[in-house]
């Protein structure tokens, strides 16, 4: 609660109140570094948008920079999904899952790996934080992630080394064996939708600014989100135009790569539930998977809502989000059916 709870609050702020200062001067320095305060407006009383979704404009201009705003909102939604994945199964523990039976182990293991990946990313940017005065906040976030990962790792090791209760074989569903995957339908759905998301996120994280031959409009997406400005590909027209100013936009690059990393972690958790968690001799696979699916369905809804709100702004820049929204909506619908039924 102390670590993920605080980070979830910050993620909620990034999604629903982008640019709002909630943790004093340290938080303000980080928001200045990422350029997130550009859309926060608090001078009109109850009419103020305060960085919420009401600040989204229908038409993208150079002044309002809706593409960069979209990156901040999506990063908040993806981050909130990951941190809620650690909180919801623990705070709202279902009656049919038990710590001693290993039901929580897949969620905890993927959370440990996600925390370490995020902490490493923040640590790699400490020099950039220091230049902009945001090193205290960056170090604090990395420290919280590492401390939480160590505590979770200690718990997993303790429960693994302790004598586990004997697993009693139970009757399995028809056509299922102990090594069967829990849901073939969800596995295929994740491959079709989340697989494409993970591919684009991997490009944005490891090869920021490089255009893919697919999906369509990828060059427009990169231009709209500002990737060509903060990460112009070498030996390209964009490099000639923006190469000199690119280092000045390191905060935008950080925000873009942070979004990509959160999407990769969330995708990894989905694939873990689809392919690594098995039915098991005691038929506990579905219980383990539902701890993923329920939070992931909520996270998908966050991402879907955000994309839908920005559809008009993206369309004004000739970027059509309709297929993206329909695909993600289909996955969210299927995921919700298996998670809550």
Image (cartoon, rainbow, N blue to C red):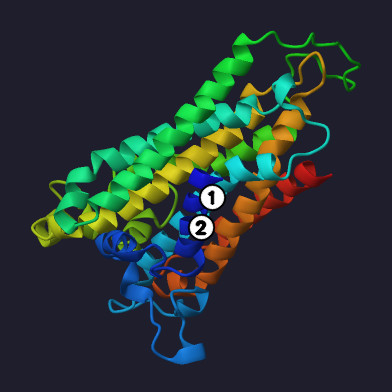
Left or right of 14? Residue 290 is right
Q: Nearer the viewer, residue 274 or 290?
A: 290
The residue singled out by tag 1 in the image is 5
Q: Nearer the viewer, residue 26 or 231?
A: 26
Taking the spot 33% from the left edge, 57% from the top edge, the residue there is 222
Q: Where the N terminus falls, by quadrant?
A: top right
Distance from the alpha carbon under mark 2 to that under mark 1? 6 Å
Query: Is residue 51 visible in the rendered structure shown here?
Result: yes
Taking the spot 41% from the left edge, 32% from the top edge, the residue there is 116
Mark 1 neighbour density, 10 Å: few (under 14) some (14–19) many (20 or more): some
65 lies above or below 329: below
Left or right of 198? Residue 285 is right
Q: Where the C terminus falls, by quadrant?
A: top right
Helix, strand or loop for disc 1: helix
Q: Quadrant of residue 291?
A: top right
Q: Residue 207 location, x and y as percent?
A: 29, 41
Q: Residue 62 location, x and y as percent?
A: 28, 76
Q: How many marks?
A: 2
Taking the spot 40% from the left edge, 60% from the top edge, the residue there is 71
Taking the spot 38% from the left edge, 59% from the top edge, the residue there is 221
Query: Is residue 212 visible in the rendered structure shown here?
Result: no
The residue singled out by tag 2 in the image is 9
Left or right of 118? Residue 208 is left
Q: Quadrant of residue 91?
A: top right
Tags 2 and 1 in contact by the CB under 8 Å rule? yes
């Amino acid at each position: 609660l102390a670590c993920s709870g605080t980070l979830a609050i910050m993620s909620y702020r990034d999604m629903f109140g982008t640019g709002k200062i909630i943790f004093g001067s340290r938080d303000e320095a980080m928001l200045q570094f990422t350029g997130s305060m550009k859309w926060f407006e608090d001078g009109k009383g109850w009419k103020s948008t305060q960085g919420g979704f009401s600040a989204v404009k229908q038409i993208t201009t150079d002044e309002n920079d809706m593409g960069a705003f979209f990156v901040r909102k999506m990063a908040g939604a993806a981050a909130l999904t990951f941190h809620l994945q650690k909180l919801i199964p623990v705070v709202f523990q279902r009656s049919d899952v038990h710590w001693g039976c290993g039901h929580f182990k897949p969620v905890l293991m993927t959370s440990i790996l996600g925390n370490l990946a995020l902490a490493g990313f923040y640590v790699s940017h400490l020099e950039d934080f220091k230049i902009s005065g945001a090193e205290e906040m960056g170090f604090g976030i990395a420290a919280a992630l590492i401390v939480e990962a160590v505590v979770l790792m200690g718990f997993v090791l303790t429960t693994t080394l302790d004598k586990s209760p004997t697993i009693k074989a139970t009757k399995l569903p028809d056509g299922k064996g102990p090594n069967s995957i829990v849901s073939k339908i969800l596995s295929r759905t994740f491959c079709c939708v989340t697989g494409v998301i993970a591919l684009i996120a991997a490009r944005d994280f490891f090869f920021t600014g490089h255009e893919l031959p697919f999906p369509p409009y990828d060059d427009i997406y990169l231009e709209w989100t500002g990737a060509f400005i903060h990460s112009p590909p070498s030996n390209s027209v964009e490099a000639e135009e923006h190469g000199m100013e690119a280092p000045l936009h390191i905060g935008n690059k950080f925000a873009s790569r942070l979004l990509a990393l959160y999407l990769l972690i969330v995708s990894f958790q989905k694939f873990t539930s689809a392919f690594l968690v098995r039915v098991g001799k005691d038929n506990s696979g579905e219980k383990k998977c539902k701890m993923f699916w329920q939070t992931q369905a909520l996270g998908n809804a966050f991402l879907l809502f955000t994309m839908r709100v920005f559809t008009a702004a993206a369309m004004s820049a000739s970027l059509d989000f309709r297929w993206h929204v329909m695909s993600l909506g289909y996955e969210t619908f299927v995921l919700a059916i298996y998670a809550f039924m």
